[in-house]
């Protein structure tokens, strides 16, 4: 089972040297990938706005800039987004940023994308929340054309490119792995029909197995090989204020390892360890985070291989 770490923006307060130290320690422990969570801006709770799962003032480093920084201080570990809210970004610019990270990291990038949920964030970025599904499909197609084609031609409802070029091409070319996040029927359909894999959030056990089966069915309908797809799960939902069961989870090492083994049995080949959760569970320093990440890594490897 491949293990990825959801990197914690909370450590920005410790400074860039400590961010680099944590990233290199994660690589040294033996994790397969470092993933970055994405929000650009968060809305305060106001009348008429859907409640958010975390406070508006939660610190979040920009995902792609952070990946570039981590790429410069690591050598082997994979790099990814889990997930980038693609339809609220301009896809040609996103394609260039992803391509540059892949180039500067020596082909270590995996792209995870989703449509997001926060309408106020779309509004602040000047993008249309209500057409994000269709914009997502166009953005994926256009990004892959930028990575692959010598001459880029694209005419969609939301985005256009006429007789354009983007160089250099990324080392992985048009084959930069592109995984789809989300649990909606549309996300599962998109993962099966255009994705290289699916990233699950809070879906384990029979629910996760059923979703994997649905993604594979969609791949077959699109004349794609369902066995070529990858599947990743979060071993726990992010910690929630006032919910001790989520805030203490990452300190219960044997439970985490057992969850990973059950996820593997359900069909997941990747599992994500949330370092913000490790921090909330009591590892309040970089040294403590590194120590617990090593313990979790070894325990999960022992259960899953």
Image: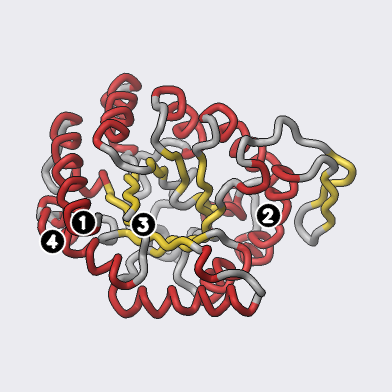
Label 4, label 2: how far apart the Cα atoms are: 39 Å
Q: Quick check: 22 above or below 299? A: above
Q: Earlier in the sequence, mark 4 or mark 2?
A: 2
- Which marked residue is nearer to the observer: mark 4 or mark 3? 3
In the figure, is residue 166 to the left or right of 5? Answer: right
Q: Are marks 2 and 1 in contact (CB under 8 Å)?
A: no
**Mark number, residue 241:** 1
**Looking at this rendering, what residue extends furthest in the right direction?**
163
Q: In the rendered structure, which disc, 3 or 1, sits on the residue that comes first in sequence?
A: 1
Distance of mark 2 from mark 1, alpha carbons?
35 Å
Mark 4 highlights which residue? Answer: 255
Q: Earlier in the sequence, mark 3 or mark 2?
A: 2
Q: Are marks 4 and 3 in contact (CB under 8 Å)?
A: no
Q: CA distance from mark 4 to mark 1?
A: 21 Å
Mark in the foreground, 2 or 1: 2
- Residue visible at 77% across and 53% down? 159
Relative depth, front residue between 242 and 229: 229
Q: CA distance from mark 3 to mark 2?
A: 25 Å
């Amino acid at each position: 089972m491949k293990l990825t770490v959801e990197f914690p923006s909370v450590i920005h307060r410790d400074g860039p040297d400590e961010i680099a130290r944590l990233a290199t320690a994660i690589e040294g422990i033996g994790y397969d990938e470092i993933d970055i969570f994405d929000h650009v801006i968060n809305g305060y709770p106001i009348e008429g706005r859907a409640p958010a799962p975390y406070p508006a003032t939660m610190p979040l480093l920009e995902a792609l800039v952070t990946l570039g920084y981590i790429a410069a201080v690591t050598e082997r570990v994979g790099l990814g987004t889990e997930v980038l809210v693609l339809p609220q970004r301009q896809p040609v610019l996103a394609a260039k940023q992803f391509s540059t990270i892949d180039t500067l990291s020596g082909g270590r990038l995996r792209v995870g994308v989703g449509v997001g949920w926060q309408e106020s964030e779309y509004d602040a970025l000047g993008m249309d929340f209500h057409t994000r599904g269709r914009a997502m499909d166009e953005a994926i197609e256009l990004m892959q054309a930028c990575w692959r084609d010598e001459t880029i031609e694209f005419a969609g409802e939301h985005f256009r490119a006429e007789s354009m070029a983007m160089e250099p091409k990324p080392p992985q070319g048009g084959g930069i792995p592109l995984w789809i996040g989300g649990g909606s029927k549309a996300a599962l359909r998109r993962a099966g029909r255009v994705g290289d894999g699916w990233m699950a959030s809070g879906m384990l056990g029979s629910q996760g197995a059923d979703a994997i089966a649905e993604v594979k069915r969609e791949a077959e309908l699109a004349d794609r090989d369902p066995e070529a797809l990858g599947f990743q799960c979060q071993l726990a939902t992010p910690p929630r204020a006032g919910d001790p069961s989520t805030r203490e989870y990452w300190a219960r090492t044997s439970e985490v390892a057992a969850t990973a083994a059950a996820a593997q049995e359900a069909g997941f080949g990747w599992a994500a360890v949330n370092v913000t959760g490790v921090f909330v569970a009591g590892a309040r320093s970089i040294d403590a985070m590194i120590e617990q990440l090593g313990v979790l890594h070894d325990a999960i490897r022992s259960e899953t291989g």
